[in-house]
Amino acid sequence: MTDDRISGIALIAGSIASIITMSLHPTGHDLLTPGRFQDMERLAKAVHALALLSLPIFFFGAYGLSRRLKANSQLALAALVTYGFALVAVMNAAVCSGLIAPSVASRMLDANAVNGDLWRALFRFTGDMNQAFALVFVMAASCAIVFWSVAIFRSKVMPQWLARYGCVIAPVTMLAVGSGHIRLDVHGFGAIVLGQAIWFVGAGIGLCKAEAPIPDSPTPTSEVPVIP
């Protein structure tokens, strides 16, 4: 199995994990429903554990993609660095949403009337932190997709539809989020994750089908006649 194929499988696996995470992601209202709290708490921790597990897999695949596009080394490197920054942001968002928020919700449901107001404020603050980190992820990941897409367009070593799709979906996503037309709640963020997952699955398939790189041919050495 080639390195490109392994990287492609990593991108596809990470994309599937992200889609599963968002399709099963409970909302804040679900967590605050007393009769459903324990089930929703377990579900929240499970899907966010899957999301956190997928992040290094995603980065492994992203590294392979940038290596494949080494002909445009600066763009590919810029994409990899930007996407690594995005993954750090979404890791923090997942920790806030999947690990901190359920614990705060548990204390809020069990608290007395005085402390309940404090825990409600902390729950809202955790949600604000989650939204802030999610915003950083969306913008940085979209920039990375644009860089990769331009590198694909220039190098022509990957499907060109992927470059066109990336150059459209990423700016549209940034514009829609920046203008407030898409909110970064479970549904809005899930739609963005799906749009990006389509691009990464396409990139993964392209890597799996990529031809093996042609090894550099050795420079021929000319024999210098020895003058007696």
Image (cartoon, rainbow, N blue to C red):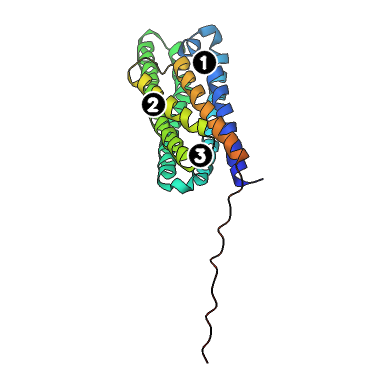
* Camera-nearest residue between 105 and 64: 64
Q: Residue at x 41, y 42 (%)?
A: 75
Determine which residue is flagged by label 3.
62
Spatial CA span between label 1 and label 2: 28 Å
Q: Amino acid at mark 1?
A: Pro
Helix, strand or loop under label 1: loop
Q: Amino acid at mark 3?
A: Ala
Spatial CA span between label 3 and label 1: 28 Å
Residue 38 tag number:
none
* Camera-nearest residue between 35 and 161: 161
Instruction: List the single residue furthest toward the bottom.
Output: 228
Residue 171 tag number:
2
Spatial CA span between label 3 and label 2: 20 Å
Q: Is residue 123 left or right of residue 58?
A: left
Instruction: List the single residue furthest toward the right.
Output: 1
* Neighbourhood count class around disc 3 (C-alpha, 10 Å): few under 14, some 14–19, many 20 upward: many
Front label number (3 vs 2) = 2
Residue 40 in percent (x, y) is at 55, 15
Front label number (1 vs 2) = 2
Mark sitting earlier along the chain (3/1): 1
Q: Residue at x 55, y 29 (%)?
A: 15
Determine which residue is flagged by label 1.
26
Asked if the residues shown at circle 3 and circle 2 are in contact, with their CB atoms under 8 angstroms apart, the answer is no
Mark sitting earlier along the chain (3/2): 3
